[in-house]
Image: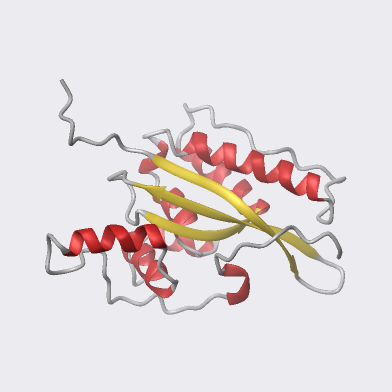
Amino acid sequence: MTPKHETQEFVTVLVRDPRLQREDYWHSHIDYEIFIHTNSMCFTRKTSCVRRRFRDFVWLRQRLQSNAVLIQLPELPSKTPFFNTNNPQHVDQRRKGLQQFLQEILQNMLLLSDSRLHLFVQTQLSPEEIEACVSGQTKYSVAEAIHEFACLKRRFPVEDEERKKEENYADSDSESSSSGLGHSSNDSNSHGCKGSTVPEEA
Protein backbone atom coordinates (compact mmCIF):
# COMPACT_ATOMS: atom_id res chain seq x y z
CA MET A 1 0.00 0.00 0.00
CA THR A 2 1.28 3.45 -0.89
CA PRO A 3 1.97 5.68 2.16
CA LYS A 4 -0.39 8.60 2.48
CA HIS A 5 2.45 11.10 2.70
CA GLU A 6 3.96 9.93 -0.60
CA THR A 7 2.92 12.32 -3.36
CA GLN A 8 2.75 11.43 -7.04
CA GLU A 9 5.10 13.28 -9.37
CA PHE A 10 3.52 15.69 -11.81
CA VAL A 11 4.61 18.08 -14.53
CA THR A 12 2.29 20.94 -15.44
CA VAL A 13 3.16 22.83 -18.61
CA LEU A 14 1.25 25.75 -20.06
CA VAL A 15 1.93 27.53 -23.33
CA ARG A 16 0.24 30.92 -23.04
CA ASP A 17 0.47 34.69 -23.44
CA PRO A 18 1.27 34.94 -27.19
CA ARG A 19 2.92 38.25 -28.04
CA LEU A 20 3.73 39.93 -31.32
CA GLN A 21 7.45 40.80 -31.52
CA ARG A 22 8.60 43.17 -34.25
CA GLU A 23 11.96 42.39 -35.83
CA ASP A 24 11.94 45.30 -38.28
CA TYR A 25 9.47 47.27 -40.40
CA TRP A 26 8.60 44.26 -42.56
CA HIS A 27 9.08 41.30 -40.26
CA SER A 28 7.47 40.21 -37.01
CA HIS A 29 6.82 36.97 -35.17
CA ILE A 30 4.78 35.57 -32.29
CA ASP A 31 6.45 34.16 -29.21
CA TYR A 32 4.81 32.24 -26.39
CA GLU A 33 5.34 31.90 -22.68
CA ILE A 34 6.20 28.40 -21.45
CA PHE A 35 5.26 27.97 -17.81
CA ILE A 36 6.44 24.88 -15.94
CA HIS A 37 5.38 23.78 -12.46
CA THR A 38 6.49 20.36 -11.23
CA ASN A 39 7.61 18.31 -8.27
CA SER A 40 9.55 15.91 -10.48
CA MET A 41 13.11 15.07 -9.49
CA CYS A 42 14.03 15.32 -13.18
CA PHE A 43 13.80 19.13 -13.09
CA THR A 44 16.35 21.52 -11.64
CA ARG A 45 13.76 24.22 -11.01
CA LYS A 46 10.29 23.38 -9.82
CA THR A 47 8.79 26.53 -11.35
CA SER A 48 10.02 28.32 -14.46
CA CYS A 49 8.85 30.65 -17.19
CA VAL A 50 10.49 31.38 -20.56
CA ARG A 51 9.44 32.66 -23.97
CA ARG A 52 9.93 30.79 -27.25
CA ARG A 53 8.90 31.27 -30.85
CA PHE A 54 7.65 28.60 -33.26
CA ARG A 55 10.98 28.01 -34.99
CA ASP A 56 12.56 27.26 -31.57
CA PHE A 57 10.05 24.42 -31.16
CA VAL A 58 10.96 23.14 -34.64
CA TRP A 59 14.62 23.07 -33.62
CA LEU A 60 13.82 21.26 -30.37
CA ARG A 61 11.83 18.55 -32.10
CA GLN A 62 14.58 17.96 -34.65
CA ARG A 63 17.23 17.65 -31.94
CA LEU A 64 15.13 15.36 -29.75
CA GLN A 65 14.31 13.15 -32.73
CA SER A 66 17.95 12.86 -33.76
CA ASN A 67 18.88 11.73 -30.25
CA ALA A 68 15.95 9.33 -29.84
CA VAL A 69 15.48 7.78 -33.26
CA LEU A 70 13.37 4.88 -31.96
CA ILE A 71 10.76 7.19 -30.42
CA GLN A 72 7.92 8.58 -32.48
CA LEU A 73 7.73 12.19 -31.36
CA PRO A 74 4.41 14.06 -31.43
CA GLU A 75 3.93 16.44 -34.32
CA LEU A 76 4.07 20.21 -34.09
CA PRO A 77 1.25 22.36 -35.45
CA SER A 78 1.62 22.53 -39.21
CA LYS A 79 3.50 25.53 -40.52
CA THR A 80 1.29 27.18 -43.11
CA PRO A 81 2.06 30.17 -45.37
CA PHE A 82 -1.43 31.39 -44.56
CA PHE A 83 -0.67 31.80 -40.84
CA ASN A 84 -1.61 35.34 -39.82
CA THR A 85 0.06 36.78 -36.72
CA ASN A 86 -2.80 39.26 -36.43
CA ASN A 87 -5.48 36.57 -36.42
CA PRO A 88 -6.25 35.52 -32.80
CA GLN A 89 -7.76 32.22 -33.95
CA HIS A 90 -4.62 31.26 -35.89
CA VAL A 91 -2.40 32.20 -32.97
CA ASP A 92 -4.48 30.35 -30.38
CA GLN A 93 -4.69 27.23 -32.54
CA ARG A 94 -0.90 27.17 -32.79
CA ARG A 95 -0.57 27.86 -29.06
CA LYS A 96 -2.77 24.85 -28.25
CA GLY A 97 -0.74 22.66 -30.60
CA LEU A 98 2.55 23.73 -29.01
CA GLN A 99 1.17 23.06 -25.53
CA GLN A 100 0.00 19.58 -26.52
CA PHE A 101 3.42 18.89 -28.05
CA LEU A 102 5.23 19.81 -24.82
CA GLN A 103 2.74 17.94 -22.64
CA GLU A 104 3.48 14.73 -24.53
CA ILE A 105 7.24 15.33 -24.65
CA LEU A 106 7.49 15.97 -20.90
CA GLN A 107 5.76 12.67 -20.09
CA ASN A 108 8.49 10.63 -21.78
CA MET A 109 11.24 9.68 -19.35
CA LEU A 110 13.76 8.97 -22.11
CA LEU A 111 13.27 12.43 -23.62
CA LEU A 112 13.52 13.97 -20.14
CA SER A 113 17.09 12.70 -19.99
CA ASP A 114 18.03 15.12 -22.81
CA SER A 115 19.58 18.28 -21.37
CA ARG A 116 18.49 20.28 -24.40
CA LEU A 117 14.87 19.85 -23.38
CA HIS A 118 15.51 21.20 -19.89
CA LEU A 119 17.47 24.19 -21.17
CA PHE A 120 14.72 24.86 -23.69
CA VAL A 121 11.90 25.02 -21.14
CA GLN A 122 13.82 26.51 -18.20
CA THR A 123 16.25 29.04 -19.67
CA GLN A 124 16.15 31.75 -22.31
CA LEU A 125 19.30 30.44 -23.98
CA SER A 126 19.16 30.40 -27.77
CA PRO A 127 19.39 27.07 -29.62
CA GLU A 128 23.04 27.85 -30.41
CA GLU A 129 23.78 28.57 -26.75
CA ILE A 130 21.95 25.42 -25.68
CA GLU A 131 24.10 23.31 -28.01
CA ALA A 132 27.25 24.97 -26.68
CA CYS A 133 26.21 24.33 -23.08
CA VAL A 134 25.29 20.69 -23.66
CA SER A 135 28.57 20.03 -25.49
CA GLY A 136 30.61 21.54 -22.64
CA GLN A 137 31.77 24.63 -24.53
CA THR A 138 30.51 27.08 -21.89
CA LYS A 139 31.89 28.04 -18.49
CA TYR A 140 28.58 27.05 -16.88
CA SER A 141 26.91 23.66 -16.64
CA VAL A 142 23.32 22.84 -17.55
CA ALA A 143 22.23 23.05 -13.90
CA GLU A 144 24.09 26.33 -13.41
CA ALA A 145 22.47 27.82 -16.50
CA ILE A 146 19.01 26.92 -15.19
CA HIS A 147 19.80 28.22 -11.70
CA GLU A 148 21.21 31.49 -13.00
CA PHE A 149 18.30 32.17 -15.31
CA ALA A 150 15.83 31.64 -12.48
CA CYS A 151 17.82 33.92 -10.19
CA LEU A 152 17.66 36.73 -12.75
CA LYS A 153 13.87 36.65 -12.92
CA ARG A 154 11.19 37.44 -10.37
CA ARG A 155 10.08 34.58 -8.17
CA PHE A 156 6.71 32.96 -8.66
CA PRO A 157 4.17 32.82 -5.80
CA VAL A 158 4.04 29.04 -5.79
CA GLU A 159 7.83 28.88 -5.63
CA ASP A 160 7.92 31.34 -2.74
CA GLU A 161 5.56 29.12 -0.76
CA GLU A 162 7.70 26.05 -1.40
CA ARG A 163 10.85 27.96 -0.52
CA LYS A 164 9.40 29.07 2.82
CA LYS A 165 8.54 25.47 3.63
CA GLU A 166 12.05 24.35 2.74
CA GLU A 167 13.61 27.04 4.91
CA ASN A 168 11.76 25.62 7.90
CA TYR A 169 13.69 22.38 7.48
CA ALA A 170 17.05 23.63 6.20
CA ASP A 171 19.37 26.53 6.89
CA SER A 172 20.53 26.97 3.32
CA ASP A 173 18.83 27.27 -0.05
CA SER A 174 19.96 24.33 -2.16
CA GLU A 175 18.78 26.02 -5.35
CA SER A 176 21.02 29.07 -5.11
CA SER A 177 23.95 29.54 -7.43
CA SER A 178 26.72 32.12 -7.72
CA SER A 179 27.92 31.36 -11.21
CA GLY A 180 27.18 33.78 -14.04
CA LEU A 181 26.20 33.14 -17.62
CA GLY A 182 28.27 35.92 -19.12
CA HIS A 183 25.65 37.15 -21.54
CA SER A 184 22.34 38.94 -21.54
CA SER A 185 19.09 38.81 -23.45
CA ASN A 186 18.64 40.82 -26.62
CA ASP A 187 15.06 41.71 -25.78
CA SER A 188 14.46 41.87 -22.04
CA ASN A 189 10.93 43.16 -22.48
CA SER A 190 9.82 40.09 -24.39
CA HIS A 191 11.18 37.69 -21.77
CA GLY A 192 8.99 38.75 -18.88
CA CYS A 193 6.11 36.67 -17.64
CA LYS A 194 3.32 39.20 -17.49
CA GLY A 195 -0.13 38.43 -18.83
CA SER A 196 -1.31 40.04 -22.02
CA THR A 197 -3.65 39.44 -24.92
CA VAL A 198 -2.92 38.69 -28.54
CA PRO A 199 -2.46 41.92 -30.49
CA GLU A 200 -5.13 42.27 -33.13
CA GLU A 201 -3.44 45.00 -35.08
CA ALA A 202 -0.02 45.06 -36.68
Can you tell which quarter of the image residue 153 is in?
A: bottom left
User: Do we see residue 187 in this rendering?
Assistant: no
Q: Considering the image in quadrants, where does the N terminus appear?
A: top left
Q: Is 44 placed left or right of 193 in the picture?
A: left
Q: Closest to the observer: 1 or 70?
A: 1
Can you tell which quarter of the image residue 3 is in?
A: top left
Q: Is residue 8 above or below residue 81?
A: above
User: Do we see residue 18 in this rendering?
Assistant: yes
Q: Considering the image in quadrants, where does the C terminus appear?
A: bottom right
Q: Closest to the observer: 108 or 48?
A: 48
| Residue under the point 20% across and 35% down | 6
Q: Is 99 placed left or right of 174 in the picture?
A: right
Q: Residue furthest top?
A: 1
- Residue 21 position, x and y percent, is 73, 67
Q: Closest to the observer: 26 or 71?
A: 26
| Residue under the point 33% across and 64% down | 160
- Residue 134 position, x and y percent, is 40, 57
| Residue under the point 39% across and 56% down | 47
Can you tell which quarter of the image residue 155 is in?
A: bottom left
- Residue 57 position, x and y percent, is 60, 48
